[in-house]
Image (tube, grey):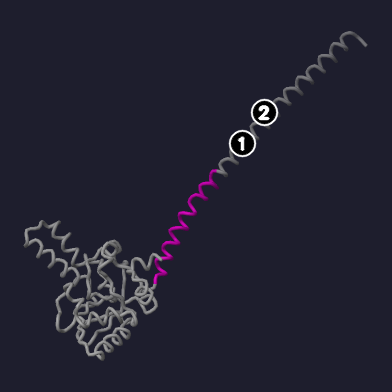
């Protein structure tokens, strides 16, 4: 073999090796880039998965709260200074003989209580019951004016008025489940009402018909309403007995 042929073969083999090395390097680079791309995509998916997991419990919690709110029985709906009347709350009222009205679902129990009270020789009078938003607004505004006439500012008068008359939208009377009951011999809405024969009977027996004294003297810090020995609220016979036996108010009962 000639010297030129040997030299040519050597150069050819050298180029082949160089090409193989270049191809190997290029392939390695491609593999590295592909691996990095897979890693980035995987990390994105993990982050997206984490975001979904952190938002689901909030959504579920809100849904659960709404379901719990909707599950509260009509007779145990809470309305107080901190808990206004549910939005779009609607009831069917039934008129009493004296022109007052109540939620028709408590009508029969109310009539039974009043009839039994009269059979006991007493003369109860329902002086207030269901109120519309307009009626409650009028009562509140009248009370505000009384305080303003005593020298209180508008804001101060509203605060004082709110202690005696519920701010419109926060009165149980708007539920159609609350009643102001007085004795015919003493019809003033004052603390002395508790000493009348009618109130003594109601305090001992109203729970049997599903009613409770809504604002007891020793619960004003919880109800945030002054003692009213004439204000009764329908909660149903089961709840009324449990509240009466435990000597608690509606707010406490609903937290049990």
| 13 horizontally vs 142: left or right | right
Residue 52: give x, y in percent of width and height: 51, 50
Question: In which quadrant of the rendered view does residue 46 lie?
Answer: top right
- The residue singled out by tag 2 in the image is 29
Q: Secondary structure at mark 2?
A: helix
Residue at the spot 22% in from the left edge and 74% down from the top edge: 229
**Nearer to the camera, 86 or 161:** 161
Labels 2 and 1: the sequence-earlier one: 2
Residue 136: give x, y in percent of width and height: 20, 70
Residue 137: give x, y in percent of width and height: 18, 68
Residue at the spot 54% in from the left edge and 43% down from the top edge: 47
* 4 vs 46: above or below: above
Q: Which residues are magenta?
A: 47-72
| Image quadrant occupied by the N terminus | top right
Separation (CA) of disc 2 from disc 1: 12 Å
| 152 horizontally vs 2: left or right | left
Q: Secondary structure at mark 1?
A: helix
* 66 vs 19: above or below: below
| 172 horizontally vs 33: left or right | left
Q: Which mark is residue 37?
A: 1
Majority secondary structure in the magenta region? helix
Residue at the spot 89% in from the left edge and 8% down from the top edge: 3
The residue at the far right in this view is 1
* 8 vs 211: above or below: above
User: Which class describes the residues within 10 Å of circle 2: few (<14), some (14-19), or many (20+)?
Assistant: few
Question: In which quadrant of the rendered view does residue 5 lie?
Answer: top right
56 magenta-colored:
yes
């Amino acid at each position: 073999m000639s010297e030129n042929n040997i030299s040519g073969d050597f150069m050819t083999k050298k180029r082949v090796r160089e090409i193989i090395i270049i191809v190997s390097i290029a392939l390695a680079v491609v593999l590295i880039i592909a691996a990095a791309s897979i890693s980035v995509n995987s990390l994105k998916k993990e982050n997206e998965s984490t975001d979904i997991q952190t938002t689901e419990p909030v959504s579920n919690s809100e849904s659960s709260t709404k379901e719990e709110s909707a599950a509260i029985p009509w007779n145990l709906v809470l309305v107080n200074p901190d808990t206004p009347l549910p939005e779009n709350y609607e009831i069917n009222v039934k008129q009493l003989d004296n022109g007052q009205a109540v939620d028709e679902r408590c009508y029969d129990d109310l009539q039974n209580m009043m009839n039994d009270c009269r059979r006991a020789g007493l003369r109860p009078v329902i002086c207030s019951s269901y109120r519309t938003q307009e009626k409650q607004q009028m009562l509140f505004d009248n009370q505000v004016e009384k305080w303003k006439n005593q020298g209180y500012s508008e804001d101060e008068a509203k605060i004082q008025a709110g202690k005696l008359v519920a701010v419109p939208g926060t009165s149980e009377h708007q539920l159609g489940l609350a009643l102001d009951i007085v004795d015919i011999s003493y019809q003033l809405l004052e603390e002395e009402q508790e000493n009348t024969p009618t109130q003594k009977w109601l305090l001992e027996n109203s729970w049997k018909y599903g009613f409770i004294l809504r604002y007891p003297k020793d619960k004003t810090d919880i109800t945030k309403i002054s003692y009213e020995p004439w204000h009764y609220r329908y909660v149903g016979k089961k709840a009324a007995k449990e509240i009466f036996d435990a000597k608690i108010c509606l707010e406490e009962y609903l937290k049990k």
